[in-house]
Image (cartoon, helix red, strand yellow):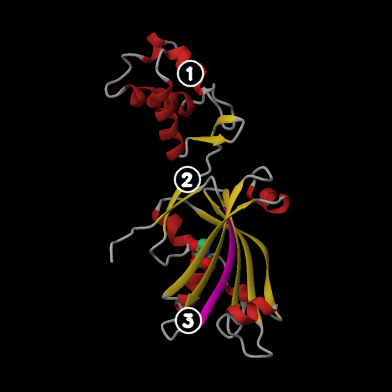
Amino acid sequence: LNPESWMGSGSGPRYVQLRRRLEESIESGLMAANEPLPAEREIAALTGLSRVTVRRAMQDLVDKGIIVQKQGSGSFVSDGTPKVEQSLSRLTSFTEDMTRRGLSSRIEWLGRGLFAPTPDEAIALALSSGEQVARLARLRMANDKPMAIERASLPSDILPDPDIVTTSLYEVLERAGNRPERAIQKISAINLDRADADLLGVEPGVAGLRIERTSYLANRRVVEFTRSIYRGDAYDFVAELRLS
Ligand code: 16G
């Protein structure tokens, strides 16, 4: 990363040149997954670039999911966990979201079955007394990296046999004519506890997002009450806002 080795290596603004240079080093395997990158000030000193330029190049790499920044300990080469920009205005499924991005999706089952509802579930799903709840607890993976833990609860008459869900819940619902058409979603910031961090393959205490989705059929019946824990470093949520 000395001035001669990067300058003149391409055209465009300096931060773009530096970004390309760093990208090449990572892609060629010169810097391996999880390896720390030099500090911003060291890169600035090595290249003769300003820290603003270095910061901009690094930020681009963070946005592209090529490096990850960990509070207090610097930047590291990503382990390949995808960085997903997720729209908050469309009611899509995890499987659809990943497929659309060309990522493979996979499930690790954490549990499933029919149960007596908790008071929370009974209220959220507007269950009548004695009605059971179908629960699906899944670790959702993209390109074999854990992205989210999802715990879905559905009225048992909507999903009488939880075992028929092999990959996509929404696909199963769609086939039965029960695909939700509206949902309310609540997102809160959390620090991952040890159990969730272990499942997601990150350090305990790092940032995560708790997302609650309640989905409805056209006739306003609740189909799904899902509580999820998403990796904070893997997601950017994006919403389009309009005046009026
Ligand atoms: C999304 C939903 C989840 C839904 C799942 C269905 C969020 C926070 N959650 O992950 O509520 O159950 O998609 O995905 O967006 P599937 O059809 O792939 O099982």
Between discs 2 and 3, the one toward the N terminus: 2
Cα distance in 3D space between marks 1 and 3: 57 Å
Which quarter of the image is occupied by the C terminus?
Answer: bottom left
Quadrant the N terminus occupies: top left
Q: Residue at x 46, y 64 (%)?
A: 93
Q: Position of residue 117 (x, y in %)?
A: 68, 80
Quadrant of the rendered image containing residue 106: bottom right
Q: Is residue 62 left or right of residue 118?
A: left
Check if residue 226 falls in the magenta segment.
yes
**Secondary element at tag 2:** loop
Magenta stretch bounds: 221-230
Q: Residue at x 53, y 43 (%)?
A: 81
Give the vertical position of 31 relative to 172 (above or below).
above
Reply above or below: 20 against 109. Answer: above
Mark seen at residue 83: 2
Instruction: Mark 2: give few (<14), some (14-19) or many (20+) Cα within 10 Å.
Output: many
Instruction: Determine whether the beta carbon of the residue marked 1 sits less than 8 angstroms from the nearest atom of ligand 1.
Output: no
Return the mark for residue 43: 1
Q: Main secondary structure of the magenta part?
A: strand
Residue at coordinates 27% horizontally, 24% vertically from top-left?
Answer: 12
Mark in front: 1 vs 3: 1
* x and y percentages locating residue 196 in the rendered image: 68, 53
**Of marks 1 and 3, which one's residue comes earlier in the chain?**
1
The amino acid on which the numbered mark 1 sits, given as a three-letter code, is Ile
Residue carrying label 3: 176
Instruction: State the residue lying farthest toward the front.
Output: 244
Q: Is residue 59 visible?
A: yes
Q: Secondary structure at mark 3?
A: loop
Give how far apart the Cα atoms at labels 1 and 2 are: 24 Å
